[in-house]
Image (spheres, rainbow, N blue to C red):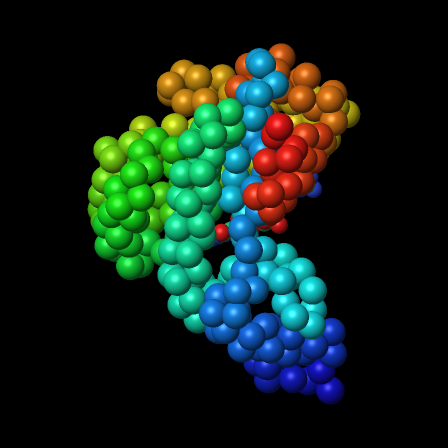
Amino acid sequence: AAKEQGRNGFSFFTPAMQQQAHTRLLLANDLRDALAKEQLQVHYQPIVDVAGGAIVKAEALLRWRHPRRGMVPPDQFISIAEENGLIHDIGDWVFRQAVQTAKRWNADGRLARQISVNLSPRQFIKGDFYISWLAYLEHNGVPPEHIVIEITEGLLLDDRPDILQIINRLGDAGIQVSLDDFGTGYSAMAYLKKFPIDYLKIDRSFVRDLESDPNDRAIAEAIVVMAHKLGLKTIAEGVETEGQRDLLAAVGCEFVQGYLYAKPMPEAEFLAFAR
Ligand code: C2E
Ligand code: MG
Ligand code: MG
Ligand code: MG
């Protein structure tokens, strides 16, 4: 019967796929109240300076503590939020959390100087979001230099003048820009000279087999060399072993992030870890 449906132009839905689609619907419904019910939480993962071993930055990573399902990973609900438009409220909320955290950490002085926030391309549809972001920083007395935004290549390939304008405005204000998951997208790379980018994040898929696969080593090294020639710095994600860290250090990668140091954790845990 399924074969017949396929021929008639219907999609081939297995029971597992139906279950998945159903779960997605239920999650979409629950996500509407997640912010108001304070089920969302921001965790922080240290980003370490390879040279000195100090925690110099942290990445803000969103978590959803679902009352019945437990921890729902962002890969399972960000795309839902993008679809139903909740990403704007959620994205603004993550940003404000990160700013408040940066404010506390900078008062301390010994903690990570910069916090990076992930942005969905969808957030750029509301072209004026950055105005309220910059106002929020100013209102809280947090210098924009303490915030980094993480964007992905797909956004820059859009070639929309308003996207360039928004990123330029953020850059002019002092917010730095990281290109996340670098090397996994289209890597058209022409955009690298057009946008004010500060960091390339070497994707975890190139880091994972670094010790056994010479091709991954070549790719990691090529990314670092290109970044340096363009005046950018590199951050490697998903670093789990000292061997990976040492190979990255050897090719000149400046910063590393991964389970070798710590998993993303709530702010209180991060503070205990950092001290
Ligand atoms: P990402 O921005 O590339 O974040 C890095 C992911 O790698 C995180 O997954 C982190 O927990 C994981 N990771 C870090 N070190 C290691 C390691 O050593 N080993 C392994 N196996 N994994 C490691 P997470 O937190 O599940 O986030 C997944 C993705 O969800 C993020 O990928 C990002 O694209 C998205 N995301 C997370 N928070 C936000 C947010 O606030 N807004 C938006 N728009 N997207 C977010
Ligand atoms: Mg990221
Ligand atoms: Mg990444
Ligand atoms: Mg990633």
Q: Is residue 209 above or below residue 154?
A: above
Say left or right for 63 vs 263: left
Please identify the quadrant where the C terminus is shown.
top right
Count of labels in the image: 0
Q: Is residue 163 visible?
A: no
Seen at 59% across and 81% down, the residue is: 10
- Residues 179 and 110: in front is 110
Seen at 42% across and 45% down, the residue is: 100
Q: Is residue 51 visible?
A: yes
Position of residue 31 measured from the top left corner of the image (x, y, whole percent): 53, 70
- Residues 249 and 205: in front is 249
Please identify the quadrant where the N terminus is shown.
bottom right
Say left or right for 122 vs 131: right
Q: Is residue 88 above or below residue 207?
A: below
Say left or right for 201 vs 95: right
Q: Residue furthest front?
A: 108
Q: Residue furthest bottom?
A: 1
Seen at 38% across and 20% down, the residue is: 230
Seen at 67% across and 78% down, the residue is: 18
Position of residue 138 measured from the top left corner of the image (x, y, whole percent): 26, 42
Position of residue 123 measured from the top left corner of the image (x, y, whole percent): 36, 56
Say left or right for 193 vs 222: left
Q: Is residue 39 above or below residue 91?
A: below
Q: Residue furthest right?
A: 212
- Residues 221 and 2: in front is 221
When asked about the image quadrant of residue 137, the answer is: top left
